Image (spheres, rainbow, N blue to C red):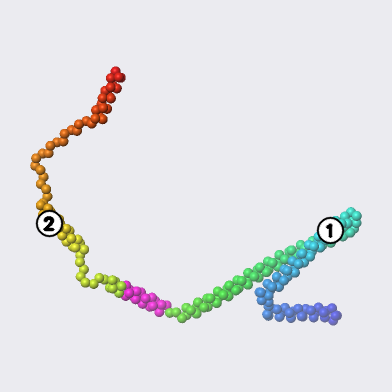
């Protein structure tokens, strides 16, 4: 077996061992997200470097221009290669960002489901210590005690002693007022008598002085008009 075959065999065996080790343990979501963020930072720095290099190559091409076409063309070729690398990095960054967001969402959903499972188990444990029949009996006892408390309140608020009809008391009060009125009339000698003779009619009032003067003025105006 050649050395190259041994080398590839050794690398393949070590690669299979590392894959088996990773599949057994596997990175946690936090570790994977952290690695992706580090990769994003590295590629972002590479972007900034390539952009500066592109600006430098453009400056070199402008500097030589038509004086040294060979140097200017070489600078433009380097610029094109740098632009291709920059485009590839842009696509890689988009893919890594999408993968990181998907992993973060999956991790969040996993944590949410885990917490909901804990809550469901806790609720189940609480309900296991509850008896529905006992709860019904307890609510029935509470209702009965509320009824007893209401009866006690009504009994306490009831007035003591004899009770009287208010209508009868008002009627008796009216009789007393009538008797008092009759006594007052007797003390005053009764009601005044109505006169039997006819009262003289009032004389018509004499016309006032102002009205007589107004009539004279009207007659004077009538004589002038004729």
Residue beneath the point at 24% across and 28% down: 212
Q: Residue furthest top?
A: 226
Mark 2 = which residue? 183
2 or 1: tag closer to the N-terminus: 1
Place of residue 31 in the rendered image (x, y in percent of width and height, measured from the top left)? 68, 75
Region of the chain picked out in magenta, as a range: 132-150
Quadrant of residue 220 in the image?
Answer: top left
In the figure, 102 relative to 190: above or below?
below
Is 153 situated left or right of 40 in this image? left
Q: Look at discs 2 and 1 and give the one toward the viewer.
A: 2
Mark 1 = which residue? 59
In the figure, 95 relative to 128: above or below?
above
Is 207 situated left or right of 117 in this image? left
Q: What is the total number of numbered labels drawn onto the structure image? A: 2
On-image quarter of the N terminus: bottom right
Q: Nearer the viewer, residue 191 or 158?
A: 191
Residue beneath the point at 24% across and 30% down: 209
Place of residue 148 in the rendered image (x, y in percent of width and height, measured from the top left)? 32, 75
Q: Nearer the viewer, residue 211 or 150?
A: 211
Q: Is residue 16 magenta?
A: no
Per the picture, the main secondary structure of the magenta-coloured stretch is: helix
Place of residue 141 in the rendered image (x, y in percent of width and height, measured from the top left)? 36, 77
In the figure, 23 relative to 177: above or below?
below
Is 22 situated left or right of 116 in this image? right
Q: Residue furthest front?
A: 209
State the separation of the CA atoms marked 2 and 1.
Answer: 132 Å
């Amino acid at each position: 077996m050649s050395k190259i075959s041994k080398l590839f065999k050794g690398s393949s065996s070590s690669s299979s061992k590392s894959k088996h080790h990773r599949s057994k343990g596997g990175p946690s979501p936090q570790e994977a997200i952290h690695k992706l963020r580090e990769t994003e930072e590295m590629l972002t720095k590479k972007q900034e470097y390539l952009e500066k290099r592109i600006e430098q190559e453009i400056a070199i091409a402008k500097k030589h221009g038509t004086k040294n076409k060979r140097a200017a063309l070489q600078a433009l070729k380097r610029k094109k290669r740098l632009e291709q690398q920059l485009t590839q990095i842009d696509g890689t960054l988009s893919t890594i960002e999408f993968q990181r967001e998907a992993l973060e969402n999956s991790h969040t959903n996993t944590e949410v489901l885990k917490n909901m499972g804990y809550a469901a188990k806790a609720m189940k444990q609480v309900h296991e210590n509850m008896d529905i029949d006992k709860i019904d009996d307890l609510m029935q006892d509470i209702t009965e005690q509320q009824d007893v408390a209401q009866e006690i309140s009504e009994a306490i608020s009831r007035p003591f002693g004899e009770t009287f009809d208010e209508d009868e008391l008002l009627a008796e009060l009216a009789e007393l007022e009538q008797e008092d009125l009759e006594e007052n009339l007797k003390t005053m000698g009764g009601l005044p008598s109505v006169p039997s003779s006819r009262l003289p009619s009032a004389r018509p009032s004499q016309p006032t002085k102002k009205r007589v003067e107004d009539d004279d003025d009207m007659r004077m105006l009538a004589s002038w008009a004729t």
